[in-house]
């Protein structure tokens, strides 16, 4: 439940046009904690309530479920894409956007790319995508737990 609330807060802030600093200021004002890491479930619910009072309208449309990526490194690609989505850095935050990014960024260097990123099997190509996404996350200030990723 806590992860879902964190995502809801990120989505609400993106919908309201709040950057990372504004989100932390809001959290500090609502529950006295600037970091979601320090917040419990009731703190997060209070932040979501405040976002809703400020005009956030949570989507009632369920997200489509895709089959889980077959490899851990491919799942990391999806996690990093989600971090960029949560940071508000993407114009097209869905799976089609990820596949378009891979095509645009790597098709010329690789000669061809699969229709879907989950079809990749070459570990070097997957690592190229991960490194590109990590660099992008760094540029936009997306929150990443590097200790967890490097394991």
Image (cartoon, rainbow, N blue to C red):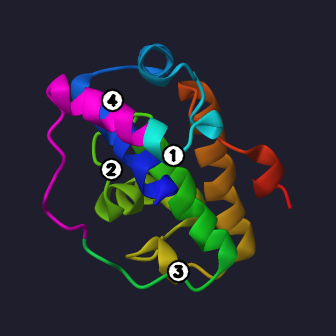
Tell me the residue that label 2 is attached to.
93
| First of labels 2, 1 by sequence position | 1
Residue 26 location (% of width, % of height): 41, 17
Tell me the residue that label 1 is attached to.
83
Q: Give yes or no for contact between labels 1 and 4 (Cβ–Cβ under 8 Å).
A: no
| First of labels 3, 4 by sequence position | 4
Q: Residue furthest front?
A: 42
Bounds of the magenta segment: 44-63
| First of labels 3, 1 by sequence position | 3
Q: Give yes or no for contact between labels 2 and 1 (Cβ–Cβ under 8 Å).
A: no
Q: Which mark is residue 98?
A: none
Is label 2 in a helix, a strand or a loop? loop
Q: Nearer the viewer, residue 145 or 39?
A: 39
The structure residue drawn at horizontal position 59% and vertical position 47%, both measured from the top left corner, is 133
Tell me the residue that label 4 is attached to.
13
Q: Which mark is residue 69?
A: 3
**Tag nearer the camera, 2 or 1:** 1
| First of labels 1, 4 by sequence position | 4
The structure residue drawn at horizontal position 13% and vertical position 59%, both measured from the top left corner, is 60
């Amino acid at each position: 439940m806590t992860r879902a609330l964190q995502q809801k807060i990120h989505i609400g802030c993106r919908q309201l046009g709040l950057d990372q600093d504004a989100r932390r200021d809001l959290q500090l004002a609502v529950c006295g904690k600037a970091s979601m890491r320090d917040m419990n479930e009731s703190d997060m619910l209070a932040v979501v309530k405040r976002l809703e009072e400020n005009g956030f309208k949570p989507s009632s449309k369920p997200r489509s479920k895709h089959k889980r990526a077959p490899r851990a490194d491919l799942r990391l690609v999806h996690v990093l894409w989600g971090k960029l989505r949560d940071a508000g850095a993407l114009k097209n935050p869905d799976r089609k956007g990820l596949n378009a990014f891979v095509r645009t960024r790597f098709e010329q260097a690789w000669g061809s790319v699969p229709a879907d990123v989950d079809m990749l099997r070459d570990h070097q190509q997957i690592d190229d995508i991960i490194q590109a996404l990590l660099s992008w996350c760094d540029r936009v200030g997306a929150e990443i737990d590097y200790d967890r990723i490097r394991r």
